[in-house]
Image (cartoon, grey):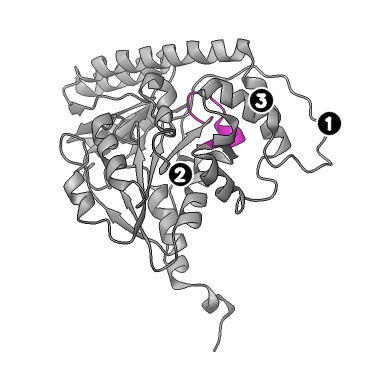
Amino acid sequence: MSNIYNIIPKYIKNLTGYQSARKIGGNGKIWLNANESPYLSKLSISFKKLNRYPHFQPEKLLLAYSLYSKIPKKNILITRGADEGIDLLIRVFCERNKDSIITIPPTYGMYDIIAKIAGIQNKKIFMLWEKNISINRIISNIKNVKIIFICRPNNPTGHLINKKTIYSILKLSKNKFFIVIDEAYIDFCITDNLSGWIKEFKNLIILRTLSKAFGLAGIRCGFILASSKIINIISKIIAPYPIPYPTYKIAYSFFSPKNINLLKKHIITINFNRFWLFHKLKKIKLIQEVFTSYANFILIKTLYVKKIFFVLQRNGIIVRDQHNVPMLRGCLRISIGTHSECKKIIETLKNLNS
């Protein structure tokens, strides 16, 4: 007997969706599993135009982010978070059942999920032990590849892939395929950003977001930075009204001098908290390794991963279990919270240690 659900493609029915922090859930008061900012921004906004469709690309927000990023407006496209940017790039540049992307695991899981939905092969080139990329392995896998996604700083390891390596890949890929650098966490180490290379490399595309350092995860606002030709092409397939009016108003108001100064203070505080937590975690005997991070989280490795995860949870601290991710057996990812939240983690682990 026929069933209406039979018309749904098998690759969709069999898909395991991305397990976001909110999907996984948990019970606790200290949420350190989604790499959100622990600090709220003080914004006072009134919405008077909700009966009208928003502008396609709000001019004021484009100008504000242009001034912040030092990238011309013509090289910026506003998106609903960096996730929409990933989806748009795969849809624009890749043909179903023909083209491929390359990712460098362990890394952000949405590259793989969106590729599967789009019917695109993901050629996974696992990172070397020194947390760099094998250029030789890329060369041997570039057939039908249209995009290489590189998360920098990388989620969930927190490290920065070497600039020289990326420069070499960009030279190798000129006029052949696109290099997408996901800079979701770059505001925590802004001097290491690669946006200045867009002029030199027309195949370089950068993803940014307001969800991390800016503390605006709830409004879903991100940016694609690329050559004006690429921006114009992507503009053809993005939704006709991609940026809700409240999102635009909140995001734009954040770029006032007062809020930018507050942002800088928050970044300094989070980086200090990460430095403090890093050194305290290294003294916990149950932890084998604490990975150096340039983002707002720290990855740890332990033989007691389940025990530590559930003890933290029992004490109201929710972190991200990475144990089942390839190459991350025994790992937990801890988002950087307030100093008191970081102290709570150490106190809890010290008690477990004893």
Q: Is residue 328 above or below residue 164?
A: below
Q: What element does badge 2 sit on?
A: loop
For the question of whether residue 322 can be seen, the reply is no
* First in residue order: circle 2 vs circle 1: 2
Q: Is residue 354 left or right of residue 69?
A: left
Q: Magenta stretch?
A: 210-223
Q: Residue at label 1? A: 48
Q: Residue at label 3? A: 252
Label 1 and label 3: CA atoms lie apart by 15 Å
Which of these two is toward me, 37 or 29? 37
Q: Locate residue 62: give its quadrant.
A: top right
Q: Residue at label 2? A: 20
- Dominant SS in magenta: loop
* First in residue order: circle 3 vs circle 2: 2
Mark identifier at residue 16: none
Tag 2: residue type?
A: Ser
How crowded pointer 2 is (Cα within 10 Å; few <14, some 14-19, many 20+) is rated as: few
Q: Is residue 348 magenta?
A: no
Residue found at x 59% / y 35%: 74
Residue found at x 19% / y 17%: 283
Quadrant location, the N terminus: bottom right
* First in residue order: circle 1 vs circle 3: 1
Label 2 or label 1, whichever lies nearer to me, is 1
How crowded pointer 1 is (Cα within 10 Å; few <14, some 14-19, many 20+) is rated as: few
Which of these two is toward me, 269 or 24? 269
Q: Is residue 146 left or right of residue 42?
A: left
Residue pushed farthest bottom?
A: 1
Residue 15 in picture, x, y percent from top left? 42, 62
Residue 30 in picture, x, y percent from top left? 45, 26
Tag 3: residue type?
A: Tyr
